[in-house]
Amino acid sequence: MDAQGNITPSFKKSKGGRLKLVKINGIFKTVNEPEYLEFTDELRTVFENGELINTLTFEQVKATANYKA
């Protein structure tokens, strides 16, 4: 809906398929997994089925936040 109350079509689109986040030449990009098997997925599972899988210390989070690629 615009500022005047008129309904407008959405420009947002969902990506389909099995996705992964890869880093190509220092740039992060979301891609379809089957097309980029040679690249490592940069995302890490933290929760799965309500269980905490990957615990991080506050120091690890701070170090990651301060990391410059």
Image (tube, grey):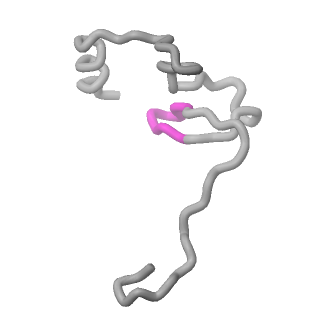
Of helix, strand and loop, which mostly describes the magenta segment?
strand
49 above or below 27?
above
Q: Is residue 5 left or right of residue 48?
A: left
Q: Is residue 64 left or right of residue 13?
A: left
Find residue 66 and report its image quarter. Answer: top left
What's drawn in magenta, residue-wise? Answer: 22-29
Query: Could you tell me which residue is drawn at 57 percent across and 41 percent down?
Result: 30
Find residue 69 and report its image quarter. Answer: top left
The one nearer the camera, 69 or 52, is 52
Q: Is residue 60 left or right of residue 21?
A: left
Q: Position of residue 32 (x, y in %)?
A: 69, 39
The one nearer the camera, 25 or 13, is 13
Q: Position of residue 51 (x, y in %)?
A: 51, 14
Q: Is residue 4 left or right of residue 29?
A: left
Query: Could you tell me which residue is drawn at 56 percent across and 19 percent down?
Result: 48
64 above or below 4?
above
